[in-house]
Image: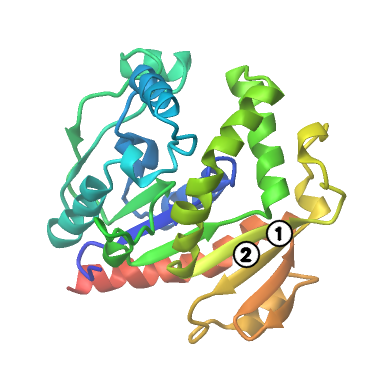
Amino acid sequence: MSKKHPVISVTGSSGAGTTTVKSTFDQIFRREGVNAISIEGDAFHRFDRAAMTAELESRKAAGDETFSHFSYEANYLGRLQEVFRIYGETGTGETRHYIHNDAEAERHGAAPGTFTDWAPFESGSDLLFYEGLHGAVVSDDANVAKYADLKIGVVPVINLEWIQKIHRDKVSRGYSTEAVTDVILRRMHAYVHCICPQFTETDVNFQRVPVVDTSNPFVARWIPTADESLVVIRFRNPRGIDFPYLISMIHDSWMSRANSIVIPGGRLDLAMQLIFTPMIHRLVDESRRV
């Protein structure tokens, strides 16, 4: 952790909704005049698309049906830890981009499924913002969580997470339901052992819970809307959290435990604005004083 150059990390699995949370943070950064460097978890994958396909085939031939992008060994977690650490100490670092589609290929000048070159951060930033799969990892070989000042988990209930992933991959990537299902099954081992443990390290967790039937996510025709959901917000350390203020500002919300508040899904953006704006101010003000 660093008082001089703070790091914010948003972590969650594929289809969890971390990109939506990033959009809210981007709004806060613009409104509050915070110069944030944003990096993506995909930048720290060990393999490009072709190499990952070959690695999966090799592992499968050897009897390993559990290897996936969720797996620690499929990512440069030591390098991610060092990016967090070095930025916290010096305000500098480097990252790259993974090219997902043709639009990104045109923007970055690299083929889909490949990486851009590593490049240094722009100077003069107020904080570093990470969004991806492994932003709060603590493993035998890396302790990413140690170097993040604010860690946020995005964790829909599992059936909802699967529905979101199935619909996203079918619409944006052209996958079939069967293909996405195979990916979900392959990732389950690493989901349990690599993704879930991070949510005991996060400072704030957001868990969206649908209030409509999602019992068979593989035949769901649409994603439950925000208004068809509740969101449970859990604070690891509730000290300093003004729960009466939050409940007064977020209509129809209530506390379910001493460290948790439940809100209507349609008010998630408002809740994040109310919760994180003062936290970001605190981090930035303290860094500028240092």
- Distance between the alpha carbons at the discs numbered 2 and 1: 6 Å
Mark 2 element type? helix
The residue where tag 1 is placed is: 267
Tell me the quarter of the picture where residue 81 sits. bottom left
The residue where tag 2 is placed is: 271
* Position of residue 93 measured from the top left corner of the image (x, y, whole percent): 17, 46
Whether residue 215 is situated above or below residue 179 in the rendered picture: below
* Position of residue 197 measured from the top left corner of the image (x, y, whole percent): 46, 62
Q: Residue at x 61, y 29 (%)?
A: 182
Q: Is residue 28 visible?
A: no
Q: Is residue 191 left or right of residue 127?
A: right
**Relative depth, front residue between 81 and 253:** 81
Q: Quadrant of the N terminus?
A: bottom left
Whether residue 177 is situated above or below residue 138 in the rendered picture: above
Query: Given the image, on which type of amino acid does mark 2 rest?
Result: Ala
Tag on residue 105? Answer: none
Q: Quadrant of the C terminus?
A: bottom left
**Relative depth, front residue between 279 and 111:** 111
Q: Residues within 10 Å of mark 1 (few under 14, many from 20)?
A: some
Q: Residues within 10 Å of mark 2 (few under 14, many from 20)?
A: some
Q: Is residue 283 visible?
A: yes
Query: Given the image, on which type of amino acid does mark 1 rest?
Result: Arg
* Position of residue 200 measured from the top left corner of the image (x, y, whole percent): 47, 69
Q: Which residue is most to the left?
A: 90
Q: Residue at x 24, y 51 (%)?
A: 125
* Position of residue 85 measured from the top left corner of the image (x, y, whole percent): 19, 58
Q: Residue at x 63, y 36 (%)?
A: 165
